[in-house]
Image (cartoon, rainbow, N blue to C red):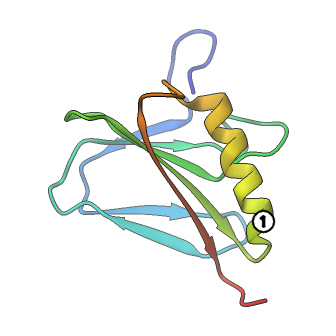
């Protein structure tokens, strides 16, 4: 998520009530943030991870304890592949694989 010089080039920070996550060729998902928590939205696909399987987005909730990581994959179809992508992103990006709370979402815009 950080470039070698320490910048967060893949991240944006927001307190918006609706957090917009868009896929490249898929639909748009809005996560609700009614308490307007401080949220870091990380573009995973093509930025934080550029090669191999990866999900589309990582949303970090770090303003209260317990911290939480939310991984999102927006698919046209093939939910099995979405699980592979989510797992790969967790392995590469999670701040704490064992102890930090995680949620994963795979959304399909197509019914098989």
Q: Is residue 73 toward the left or the right of residue 105 in the image?
A: right
Who's the residue at 49% across and 70% down the image? 29
Q: Is residue 69 toward the left or the right of residue 49 in the image?
A: left
When the figure is inspected, residue 80 is found, relative to residue 89, above or below; the finding is below
Task: Count the labels in the image.
Answer: 1
Q: Is residue 47 toward the left or the right of residue 77 in the image?
A: left
Quarter holding residue 49: top right
Who's the residue at 68% across and 73% down the image? 26
When the figure is inspected, residue 82 is found, relative to residue 112, above or below; the finding is above
Q: Nearer the viewer, residue 98 or 6?
A: 98
When the figure is inspected, residue 90 is found, relative to residue 16, above or below; the finding is above
Who's the residue at 66% across and 82% down the image? 109
Q: Quadrant of the N terminus?
A: top right
Outermost residue, top side = 5
> Label 1 neighbourhood size at 10 Å, few (<14), some (14-19), many (20+)?
few
Who's the residue at 61% across and 18% down the image? 3
Outermost residue, left side = 35
Q: Measuring from the top left, give residue 110's x and y in whole percent.
A: 72, 86
Q: Measuring from the top left, give residue 89's x and y in whole percent.
A: 66, 40
Outermost residue, bottom side = 111
Outermost residue, right side = 52
Quarter holding residue 112: bottom right
Q: Nearer the viewer, residue 45 or 78?
A: 78
Q: Measuring from the top left, give residue 73's x and y in whole percent.
A: 63, 60
Residue at mark 1: 80
Give SS at disc 1.
helix
């Amino acid at each position: 998520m950080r470039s070698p010089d320490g910048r967060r080039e893949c991240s944006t920070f927001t307190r918006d009530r609706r957090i917009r996550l868009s896929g490249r060729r898929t639909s748009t998902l809005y996560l609700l943030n009614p308490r307007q928590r401080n949220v870091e939205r990380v573009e995973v696909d093509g930025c934080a991870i550029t090669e191999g399987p990866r999900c589309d987005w990582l949303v970090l909730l770090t303003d209260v304890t317990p911290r939480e990581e939310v991984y999102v994959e927006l698919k046209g179809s093939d939910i099995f592949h979405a699980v592979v992508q989510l797992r790969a992103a967790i392995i590469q990006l999670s701040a704490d694989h064992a102890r930090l709370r995680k949620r994963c979402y795979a959304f399909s815009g197509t019914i098989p």
